Image (cartoon, rainbow, N blue to C red):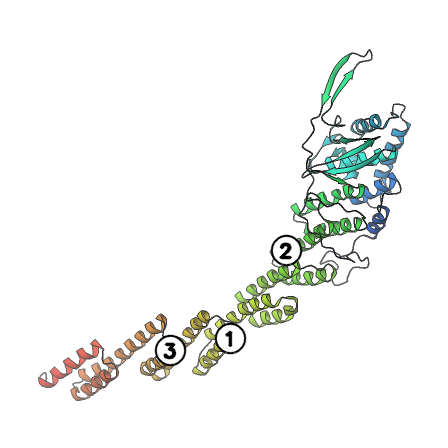
Amino acid sequence: MRVITFGMLFLGLLGWFRLGAQSPAAEGVFPGLDADPQALAYARLGTSKPDSWQDLARIALWASGDGSGTGRSMDRILAAAAELGASPSLPVEDRERGEFILTFIHHNLLKNYSERQTRLDEIFVNGRYNCVSSAVLYLILAASQGLETWGVMTRDHAFVTVRAGKETIDVETTNPYGFDPGSRREFHDEFGRLTGFAYVPARNYRDRTNLSPLELISLIFTNRIFDLEAQGRYRDSVSLALNRAALLSQRRNPVSSPFFADPNQDLLDRLLNFGVSLVKAGKEADALRWAAMAKARYPHEKWEEFTYGALHNLLVKLIRSQRLSEARAVLDTQASAQSRENLERLNVLLTDAELAHQSSQIRTVQEAEASLLAINHAENNHILSRTRAEEMRTFVFLKEGEILAAAQGWREAALFLERTRERYGSNPRLDRALQVFRSNRVTEIHNRFADLFNGKQYGAALRVVQAGLAELPGSRQLQSDLTQVEQALRHPPR
């Protein structure tokens, strides 16, 4: 027997249910944010008890999706109540009357148990029922015959309780023999002889919660919402949650139970779930627009967490496609909806991407210097960590060194890295780059030396290699070149 329950968090918000026309901007894109006007009318009927069992029937049919409750299903309920009341076998005593009604609905209306069939109107179409729909039907027909009845729910089940004098009796409405479960029921023939018995075991009812008639009926909404979300129909579930919350908004003594979903929290969850469905569909911009609309009507701190997640996803998507200016515009637009902490985190994400992109586009020394200034500014303003800033600066230094090497040679490039290490400190990447630059400078000198040596210009070759060793005294290659040219000068080849 299925009763879906959601986690509870009482919001305590006033003025949640404003009835009116749906915003034209949201029409056809987002679900409406107004409850059915009929919901508040029904809520007022249930302030204490509905004026009549007919009211209960109309409310239950409306909750089932059967419109105004004036159609064929209502006619069937009226006919069933009339047939019950006119039955010559209807007992006078409340206890026997309650059991008779259970037998009546199973004999005439309830045909097949179906865990998912929670709607009252469907009973009159195919006879299928579950614990909620059968409990609601029993409550209505019992009220039509003057019995005081209320709903009961446990963690995953619903049933009803009937008052008979000073006695209260549980009724398992899914079982034709479920009146007063745990008691043995004997059957006799016309001569009084015992022909058999039925026994429905009592469940563990320790964790049970009594429900008013409207609260029991609201479980129809709860189960329908669960079914819709199981199908991914998050948009459709919003209207049901709005109507359930509005229906229960006038309660004087609302039930508080871990098994009974608080209607305001239930509504918030449905609003958020629809937003999450947009994010999962890759519609982060729509999700943010939805959050702005829904938060204005139903404020809660959870919207901040949701908008942060949706905005983060959207920024990552824009960053990956290199649409950085668009990402910055989005962040600026959404800034007011974010906490200071979340805004800083998102700004770090985007600034990092912007600086990385800027450094990747460096083509001149001037562009490298501009990128370096931007990185330093971000570090000084605590947007970039010291480690990340150092990593970015190193990349810029290497780019600038390569630009200098192409324009002025490896000597100037190596000197630039040496000055950089003196100013900013060394790190393994700069050290390796400097080794490469110096090695390239050695190759550059060696090639000039080799051209002169091969041309037998030994004096000029000697001056080149001596100048090279003055610049790079530890070079083995240049030491070898020096030895070679000195030998050639002592013993010129013929």
Query: Real-space Cα distance between discs 1 and 2?
Result: 33 Å
- Near-viewer residue (470 or 426): 426
Q: Which callout, 3 or 2, points at the residue further toward the start of the chain?
A: 2
Q: Is residue 1 visible?
A: yes
Whether label 3 touches label 1, CB < 8 Å: no
Which SS class for mark 1? helix
Within 10 angstroms of label 2, few (less than 14), some, or many (20 or more) residues? many
Classify residue 71 by image quadrant: top right
Q: How many marks?
A: 3
In the drawing, what numbered circle is on residue 173? none
Which SS class for mark 3? helix
Q: Which residue is mark 2?
A: 276
Q: Which residue is mark 3?
A: 402
Q: Is residue 231 left or right of residue 441?
A: right
Q: Is residue 416 left or right of residue 48?
A: left
Which SS class for mark 2? helix
Q: Which residue is mark 1?
A: 378
Q: Which callout, 3 or 1, points at the residue further toward the start of the chain?
A: 1
Q: Is residue 236 above or below residue 331?
A: above
